[in-house]
């Protein structure tokens, strides 16, 4: 029975390592920030989760030890890494970082152009209003 678990743990750790190496390669080779964010979050998260789950199984099967730290690590990586990648890509999009000129098509551009104009107009109005208040004082 332990031989089966040894093979399973080895496969999990190997699969996680391969995914982490592929995501590092994607960070180097992909052309724009959005594709790099995808490589950094999706495959790295799955790779780290496989490695952590393999180590959790190792301690559980061979030592009889349930590691709460590994379970919390799995939970926090699973919850935070994709959200952080999404927020980074969203910030890049909102600051007009251009998309790759390949086959990528920006379908949100017509919608967001109007919103950006409205936001800029609101900022100008609020700045003008503050200046008028300072002049009145």
Image (tube, grey):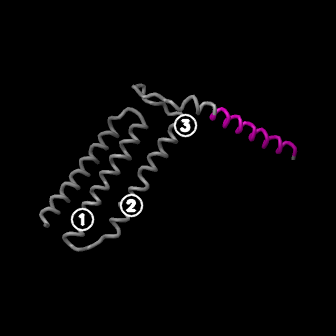
> Looking at the picture, how far across and down is residue 85, in whole percent?
44, 46
Find out whether residue 127 is within the magenta segment. Answer: yes
CA gap, disc 3 and disc 2: 31 Å
> Looking at the picture, how far across and down is residue 49, in whole percent?
31, 56
Foreground: disc 3 or disc 2? 2
Q: Quick check: marks 2 and 1 in contact, CB under 8 Å?
A: no
Q: Secondary structure at mark 2?
A: helix
Residue name at image x 75 percent, y 41 percent: 126
CA gap, disc 1 and disc 3: 43 Å
**Frontmost residue, 119 versus 95:** 119
Residue name at image x 71 percent, y 38 percent: 122
Q: Quadrant of the N terminus?
A: bottom left
Give the main secondary structure, helix, strand or loop, of the magenta stretch. helix
Number of labelled discs? Answer: 3
State which tag comes first along the sequence, 3 or 2: 2
Residue name at image x 57 percent, y 28 percent: 110
Q: Quick check: marks 3 and 2 in contact, CB under 8 Å?
A: no
Kindly identify which residue carries mark 1. Answer: 57
Q: Secondary structure at mark 1?
A: helix
- Few, some or many C-alpha atoms within 10 Å of disc 1 (few <14, some 14-19, many ≥20)? many
Is 129 placed left or right of 51 in the picture?
right
CA gap, disc 2 and disc 1: 15 Å
Kindly identify which residue carries mark 2. Answer: 75
Kindly identify which residue carries mark 3. Answer: 95
Residue name at image x 48 percent, y 44 percent: 88
Q: Which residues are magenta?
A: 115-136
């Amino acid at each position: 029975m332990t031989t089966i678990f040894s093979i399973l743990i080895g496969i999990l750790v190997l699969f996680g390592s391969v995914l982490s190496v592929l995501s590092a390669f994607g960070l180097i080779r992909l052309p724009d920030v959005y594709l790099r964010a995808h490589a950094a979050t999706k495959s790295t998260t799955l790779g780290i989760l496989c490695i952590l789950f393999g180590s959790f199984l190792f301690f559980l099967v061979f030592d009889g030890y349930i590691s709460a730290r590994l379970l919390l690590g799995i939970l926090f990586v699973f919850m935070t890494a994709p959200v952080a990648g999404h927020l980074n890509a969203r910030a890049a999009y909102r600051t007009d970082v251009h998309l790759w000129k390949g086959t990528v098509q920006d379908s949100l551009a017509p919608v967001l152009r109007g919103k950006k104009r409205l936001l800029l107009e609101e900022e100008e109005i609020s700045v003008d209003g503050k200046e008028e208040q300072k002049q009145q004082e």
